[in-house]
Image (tube, rainbow, N blue to C red):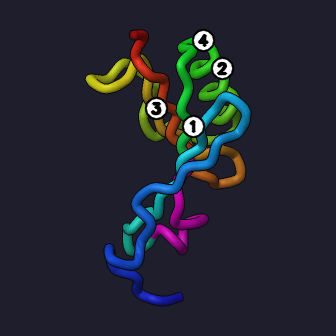
Amino acid sequence: MSDMGPAENIMHCTIKVGDSTIMMCDDSRPDAAAGGGNISLAIGLNDPALAKQIFENLARDGSVVMPLEKTFWAEAFGMVTDKFGIKWMVNCDAPK
């Protein structure tokens, strides 16, 4: 394992899957790679009910890092580690 600094980390990567967007970023904490990986996946949605359903499914047998709730940038945002140790961010845009 190398000691990667911020210049070597990926800040954002985006993949479109159907009508959804999955974003990824490196987790630059020094112990991140030892704890199940050093990336986080983010899914961007525009349906609050679907965001809640996806968040709850990911949280089942996993752990909630930040509950799904309204923020200043989103109708709903939350962070969860799924049962496989994958870190997820669920973001639902505010209605326009």
Q: Amino acid at mark 1?
A: Ile
Whichever of callouts 2 and 3 sits on the residue coming sooner in the sequence is: 2
Of badges 3 and 4, the one in the foreground is 4
Could you tell me how far apart the alpha carbons at marks 3 and 4 are, in whole angstroms? Answer: 13 Å
Q: Amino acid at mark 2?
A: Gln
Q: Amino acid at mark 3?
A: Gly
Q: Secondary structure at mark 4?
A: helix
Query: What residue is disc 2 on?
Result: 53
How many residues crowd mark 2 within 10 Å: few (<14), some (14–19), many (20+)?
Answer: few
Query: What residue is disc 4 on?
Result: 49
Could you tell me how far apart the alpha carbons at marks 2 and 4 are, in whole angstroms? Answer: 6 Å
- Which percent across, then down, holds residue 60? 69, 32
Foreground of the two, 20 or 70: 20
Is 59 inside the magenta-drawn segment?
no
Say whether marks 2 and 4 touch (CB < 8 Å). yes
* Magenta segment boundaries in residue numbering: 32-41
Q: Secondary structure at mark 2?
A: helix
